[in-house]
Image: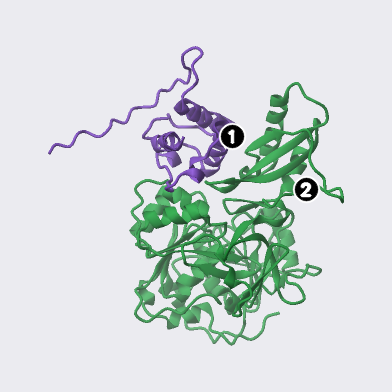
Chain colours: A green, B purple
Amino acid sequence: MSASASRPSLRETLLRSRRLDARRIFGAQAEIDLAQIAHGTALGGADLAGRSVLLRVADPAYSAVGLIELDGVARRIVLCPPDLADEALPGVIETARIDAVVYDRAPPPGVAGLVAARLTLPATPAPPQARVALDTEWVMFTSGTSGPPKMVVHSLEGLTGAIKPPAPDDDPPVWGTFYDIRRYGGLQILLRALLGEGSLVTTAPGEPMADFLARLARHGVTHLTGTPSHWRRVLMTPGANLAPRYVRLSGEIADQAVLDALKARFPGVPVGHAYASTEAGVGFEVNDGLEGFPAEFVGRSGPVEMRIVDGALQLRSSRAASGYVGAGAPALAGDDGFVDTGDMVERRGERYLFVGRRGGIINVGGLKAHPEEIEAVINRHPAVRLSRVVGRKSPITGAVVVAEVVLSAPASNEGAVKDEILAECRRGLAAFKVPAMVKFVPSLALSANGKLERPVA
Amino acid sequence: MTLSASTPNLAVPEQESCAEGAQPSLRERILARFHQVAADQEKTIAPLTDELVLLESGLDSLCFAIIVATLEDELGYDPFTEAEDVFFPVTLGDFVRFYERVR
């Protein structure tokens, strides 16, 4: 349901901002001049007003161009993440009632019959458009879930609710992010750069860390963000000559070790960690250098309210998504408006610490692995009676996947069975889901209702 | 005052065999894990010298996570979690010394 907009569009915000001529998005391949985008069209003048648009680009930097072109114009933008398979597109198009597609290199398969428009740079000058009429829906995909991808609906107002306006005398920031800007965490950084009168250095899938760090240094990055796993890789990369003014972590549990290592690596630079999810939006930031968050955050009033129910963090916030896309989709929040994040916390003194996710979901370097999906692959092996997949803490990727396997009968060749199980997992699963270890155990505990007992991962 | 030359960076011996009956050294056990994980993950690994930059070795973060977890099971400790001062190794030499120091 799109309403008339009472807010400026992204393009209008850019046109009103200072220093627009100097601002860029430095992609791995393309360098995008924001003034040229704001004053022109990269869509060849295609009319997508009021349409429900699938934004499917190969170069992530182009997604920024597409978002600037479409915000306030399209009724709905569905921002495809990099790992969304072509096979999932027909379902997405139907569920989200897509009637147009915007792409950069080649139109995706299965879009015959839709209005299609290609993003091409440089943008051509275009007369200023009529004032925007639509409060475009921004639709994003939840991360790393198994089964059909889930789409959640945001508004630009909600997405930018945690972003403070730029101070008049601040030096313009150059943001950098290890995230893909087509996902919630990366999009937050794109919006911070666009609304904060800054520039942005983006990466692309497959770009080597050393190359990206060299580009970040060359463009003088001042604000740099990534997951704890991204930052550990930075700490393991030689010669990165970075001098950020602000270092930020989110997307995974930030443990004290990585916070301390970053403080040692960037002396005097504020190191903050933030909590956000695609569904609940930006929750809070922690800037005292300690892991977890102060217990006083819970129950305080403000734009984001927090409570703990059965050990899980729940948030109520104007920055949360308004719902999932599609008829018959489950409610995203409870009746009282709180979103259950599924993130489990434990109180230690005056602090809450994150201990993992409910349902045993394992966060491997920011990617979420569901134990049931992995167990299903393991259980295909004829010698396996039962298996349980759990997370094991890792100082490198936050967690790794470990499988405990009960065999149908004692095997004389456990090593061969293990190799076969792992080979099957490698065939059927993404690399981060393949168990780092397979352990044979005599039995696995079942709960009273006959389900596998799952520790918090 | 004359500064002495820094400690030479000795190349890591390629062979992992050791004298009959002797325990493999910590270094040899670590290198064996690198080779094992590279083989399991079907990665081509660079020659394992002290100067080798870990992230240029052909192994990715997930491989290092597996190496650290399997070494913890084998050795009974994980220096990343146990060290007083937090440190992320850049080269293979750093990595081995980290394990030797915390042992």
- Name which residue lies at 47% across and 25% down: B28
- Name which residue lies at 86% across and 50% down: A448
Spot the residue most to the front.
A349
Indicate the amino acid at tag 1.
Asp
Name the residue that disc number 2 marks. Answer: A453
A17 relative position to A374: left or right: left
A282 relative position to A376: left or right: left
| Residue count near mark 1 (Cα–Cα under 10 Å), binned few <14, some 14–19, many ≥20 | few
Residue B29: horizontal and vertical position, in percent? 50, 27
Q: From what the image shows, is residue B69 above or below residue A119? A: above
Name the residue that disc number 1 marks. Answer: B73
Q: Are marks 2 and 1 on the same chain?
A: no
Label 2 to label 1, Cα distance in Å?
Answer: 23 Å
Residue B98: horizontal and vertical position, in percent? 43, 38
Task: Give the secondary structure at mark 1.
Answer: helix
Indicate the amino acid at tag 2.
Glu
| Residue A244 visible in the current orientation | yes
Q: Chain of mark 1?
A: B
Residue A264: horizontal and vertical position, in percent? 38, 54
Spot the residue most to the right.
A449
- Find residue A373 and name its label: none
